[in-house]
Amino acid sequence: CIRDSEEIARKSEGAELMGVLKMDLDRLGAAFAVGIDPPTISRISTVSTRIRLFFNGWVERICRRLRPDAIYILYSGGDDLLLIAPWDVAVETAMEIRSDFARYCSDNPNLTISAGLIFVKPTFPVQRFAELVDAALKRAKSEGGNRIAAFNRTARWDEFGEAVRFGKELAEAVGSGEMPRTFLHFLLRLSKTHAAPEGCDLRWIPRLRYAAIRRLDPKTINSLRLFERVGAMIGPPLEIAASYAILKTRR
C-alpha cells in the first residue's frame, strides 16, 4: 500500500505529494424538498437514480479521461466520493468533477457539490488523512457549500478555478526564469499580512509595486496582469494561487 502511494506521489509535477479528495452533494434533502416541482415520488426517484449514476459511473469515466494511471478511487457512490491522486492531478480532478456535475444537473442552483482536498506525503497514515480530508469538506460546507477547501483555504468554485489558472501562470513564469521562486512566497506573505475578513489593509499596493518593479521585468508584470489580478484575488484566492505555484515549482 505504501509502495503504491509512493508511486502515485512520484507522478506529481513539482512536490512529490499525494492529493486526497473528498466530495459530497450539498443539502441533498433540501434539494429534494424545494428543488423538484412537483415533488412526486417518481420525480424524486428519477433524480436520486441519476445522481447515483453520476457517482457510480461517470466519476470513473472522468478519472480515466484525466489520468487512468494515477487516480485511485477509494469509493464513489450514492452522493459522495473519496479518491487519491498526484497532488496536481487531484486539483484538476476536483474541478473536472464539479464542472461535469454542474452540466449534468443543467446548472440547477439547488444541486451543488462541495469538496475537501488535502496534500500529504505518501507515508501519511490512511486513518489520519481520512480525518483531515473529512474536516476540510465540513469546512467547505460550513461556509455555505458549493465550495472547495484546499491549500488550507476555502473558496467558491469560480474563485478556485481562477486561482489555479493564475497559479499555473506563476509557475510557468518561475520555470522560464522570468520570476524568482521567492516572489511566490512574497505573494503568499503579502496576502496573509494585509487581507482580513473585514477588508484589506491597502498598504499591500505599494509593497507589491515596489517588489515587482525591483524584481520582475515589466514584460512579465504586463503579461501576468500582475497588479490587476493580485488586486482582484488578495485573500484566500491569491493564497491558493501562490500555494499552487509553490508546490508546482518545488524540486
Image (cartoon, rainbow, N blue to C red):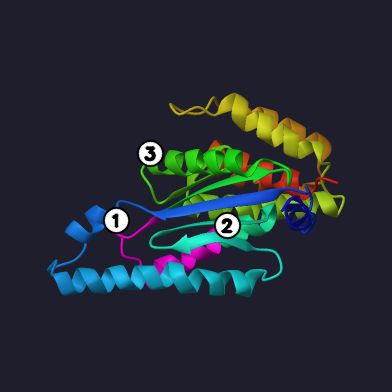
Highlighted magenta segment, given as a residue range? 94-113
Amino acid marked by disc 3: Ser
Q: Residue placed at 44% from the left, 67% from the top?
A: 55
Q: Residues within 10 Å of mark 3 (few under 14, many from 20)?
A: few
Kind of residue sitting beneath label 2: Leu
Examine the image and state in which quarter residue 236 appears: top right
Residue 83 place in picture, x, y as percent: 57, 57
Query: Which residue corresponds to mark 3?
Result: 142
**Which amino acid does the dot numbered 1 rest on?**
Leu
Q: Secondary structure at mark 2?
A: strand
Query: Left of 45 or right of it: where is 122?
Result: right
Q: Please say if 83 is above or below 190.
A: below
Toward the front, the furthest residue is 1
Label 1 – label 2 distance at C-alpha: 21 Å
Give how far across and how far down residue 130 sits, in percent.
55, 44
Name which residue lies at 68% across and 52% down.
Answer: 87
